[in-house]
Image (cartoon, rainbow, N blue to C red):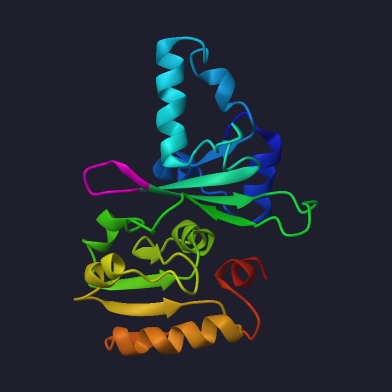
């Protein structure tokens, strides 16, 4: 990522410029160079590594990088293992139907920024990881995110069970509906109301 001007420009455009952000969350950028960084595919080590990455979903069956063209945010377990990855496409000139948001195949796993949650009795819950990074850059360390409006998991619910939760979902129809559903699951919660039609990142850049 640090050697990719286009990726750094995207972070700048989104206001994600804290000097410790990239290292703290081990952000990356997928740009079709992964294959060149692995041992050759005709070697045992290279074939084995590609097979493992394909099984995880990092490499697709076609051989292409799953997150190509995306800023990549890993989600770690408490023991330091990567249990989920999120990719956000940075270019707008995509083919129709190309998703802007990508995850590893299978059910969502992991709690983003879990160690910070364990240190606080209050937690900000965002709809997206980009919004969570926005809060973090603004000095709010006790922040986490679900995996979109329909991505609130039982694992995350357990992590928030004894917290007062500030639900900072997007102020649009989908975000409002999801926040209302969440308030029933998280009785000790408060809805953060951005201006109509805005999310945390848009509001921070206003």
Q: Residue at (48%, 14%) from the top-left corner? A: 39
- Foreground residue, 159 or 121? 159
- Foreground residue, 129 or 140? 129
Q: Residue at (47%, 26%) from the top-left corner? A: 50
Q: Residue at (69%, 35%) from the top-left corner? A: 5
Work out whether 110 lies above or below 161: above
The quadrant of the rendering that contains the C terminus is bottom right
The quadrant of the rendering that contains the N terminus is top right
Is 26 one of the magenta-colored residues?
Answer: no
Report whether residue 114 is seen. yes
Give the farthest residue toward the left.
162
x, y percent for residue 160: 26, 72
Q: Residue at (28%, 89%) from the top-left corner? A: 187
User: In the rendered image, which quarter is residue 181 located in?
Assistant: bottom left
User: In the rendered image, which quarter is residue 153 located in?
Assistant: bottom left
Prevailing secondary structure of the magenta residues: loop
x, y percent for residue 82: 34, 43
Work out whether 61 lies above or below 10: above
- Foreground residue, 176 or 15? 176
Give the farthest residue toward the front.
61
x, y percent for residue 156: 30, 67
Q: What stretch is highlighted in magenta?
A: 76-83
Report whether residue 193 is seen. no
x, y percent for residue 33: 61, 26
Number of marks in the rendered image: 0
Is 80 one of the magenta-colored residues?
Answer: yes
């Amino acid at each position: 990522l640090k050697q990719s001007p286009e990726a750094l420009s995207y972070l700048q455009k989104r206001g994600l410029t804290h000097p410790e952000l990239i290292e703290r969350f081990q952000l990356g950028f997928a740009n079709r160079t992964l294959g060149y960084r692995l041992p050759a595919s005709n070697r045992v080590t290279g074939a084995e590594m590609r097979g493992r990455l394909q099984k995880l979903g990092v490499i697709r069956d076609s051989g292409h990088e799953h997150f190509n063209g995306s800023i990549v945010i890993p989600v770690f377990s408490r023991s330091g293992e990567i249990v989920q990855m999120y990719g956000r496409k940075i270019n707008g000139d995509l083919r129709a139907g190309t998703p802007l948001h990508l995850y590893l195949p299978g059910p969502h796993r992991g709690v983003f920024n879990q160690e910070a949650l364990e240190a606080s009795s209050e937690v900000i819950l965002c709809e997206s990881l980009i919004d969570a990074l926005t809060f973090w850059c603004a000095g709010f360390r006790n922040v986490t995110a679900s995996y979109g409006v329909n991505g609130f998991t039982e694992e995350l619910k357990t992590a928030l069970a004894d917290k007062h939760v500030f639900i900072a979902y997007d102020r649009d129809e989908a975000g409002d509906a999801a926040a209302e559903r969440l308030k029933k699951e998280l009785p000790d919660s408060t809805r953060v109301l951005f201006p109509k039609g805005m999310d945390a990142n848009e509001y921070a850049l206003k």
